[in-house]
Amino acid sequence: MTSNRLLKLFHALFYSTNALLIPYLPLLLRERGFQSLEVGTLLMLGPFLAVFAQPVAGLVSDRMKAIRPLLLGLWIGKGIAAACLFLSTDRITAAISLLALYICFLPAVSLLDTLTVKSATALGQSYSSIRMWGSVGFTLTAIVMGQMFDLWGGVDALFWMYLPIWGGLLLSMFLLQEPPQEAADTDTAVNAAVLKKALSVPSLLLFLALIFVIAMPHRMNDALLSLHMNDLGASSMQVSWAWAVAGFSEIIGFALMTRLMQRSRMLTLLTLVSALYAIRWLLYALVTDPWVVVVLQGAHAVTYAALWVLAIEFVVQLLPKQLAATGQALLGMVFLGLAGIAGGMSGGALQEAYGGQAMYLYGFVCGVIGTAGFMLWLIRERKRSVRPEEQMIG
């Protein structure tokens, strides 16, 4: 197998594990006796803590001048944490194992992205052409789980479903070749002085605040959609199909955004995407048929995929080149960390007290606030553009 094909297979296996974790971890935790607020908090606390582990992993990798050994160690750690989580019936053990799983997994995502960029350059490929296979692996695994999950034993058999995928990737890791570290490569850790300089840019702070508002209900949905569908009477197959539709639409969304950004202005698109998010959450609040929720997950293409691509590119244009990497790191911390923990806790509390409808109406309000914020920014920039010497990002 060529290095290119092996790397694509690696991505497919790596992200296939998410097709087990994202839909079924909430159901597993509920079976272990956790309430909705506790489930939402735990599922978002893990990524929040992992945000602080990511720079450490990058620094260690830079010191080692290698990625694969650390990636291997994190993957083994994730496997041990997953085994403890799936096989334990004790609440405390389950909670600690879940947090450890995220702390191992999310830094591995960043390291894999770095390895992919290096390998893609060496192979003459684009990053997106390789990363896309992660979404393919996620979608295919979610479809298979939708058909076979209950037949294979449901949440009590998650360990045996997870083990072959984890083991397959572990074996492929020994075959994967890492391009040599170039002398020109620099330390990727966030420098305090550079961080302070980036945070002194008012436009970046405003942008991150709006992203925080938009991302809260998105991350809330990541953590609690399975519980909401379960409350609506959905079967395990319908839960799997909901995430399969989201994964497939994500592939389409990334492909479409590459073309749209060449023709459209970013603030305009950010305003539109925020409005689409508001509509998406309003529909989730109104519908009660699980199959309709499955269909609505297709909106992932014009909400999450669009928002993430736009946000990354917007930060690049907003900041000087030397601050772009720091800006993207801050974007990840806000989207995955701060918005995650806030959305998980607030959404879990609303679902527990008032039900899923209230949770998604809260998401609708966040979408409206984000839309209004980006629209006001767009109007201000258009007024400034009257002077020909000033350029507009919108």
Image (spheres, rainbow, N blue to C red):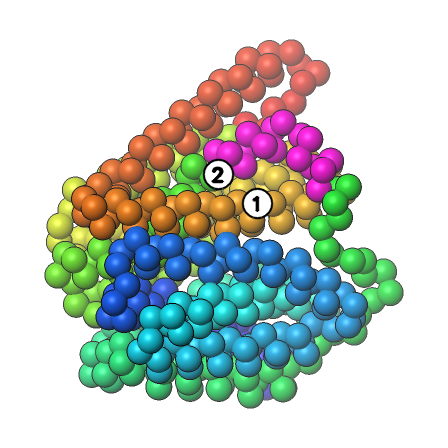
Residue 264 vs residue 108, the one in the foreground: 108
Q: Identify residue type, mark 1.
A: Leu
Please state if 9 lies on the left or on the right of 236 as rendered. Answer: right
Q: Quadrant of the C terminus?
A: top right
How many badges with numbers are in the image?
2
Percent of width and height locating residue 10? 54, 76
User: At x 58% / y 38%, what residue is drawn?
Assistant: 314
User: At x 54% / y 33%, what residue is drawn?
Assistant: 207
Which residue was labeled with disc 1?
331
Determine the secondary structure under disc 1.
Answer: helix
The reply to whether the C-beta atoms of the residues labelled 2 and 1 are less than 8 Å apart is yes
Q: Main secondary structure of the magenta part?
A: helix
Determine the secondary structure under disc 2.
Answer: helix
> To which quarter of the image does residue 138 belong?
bottom left
Q: Residues within 10 Å of mark 2 (few under 14, many from 20)?
A: many
**Is there any visible trace of residue 244 in the rendered image?**
no
Please state if 72 lies on the left or on the right of 295 as rendered. Answer: right
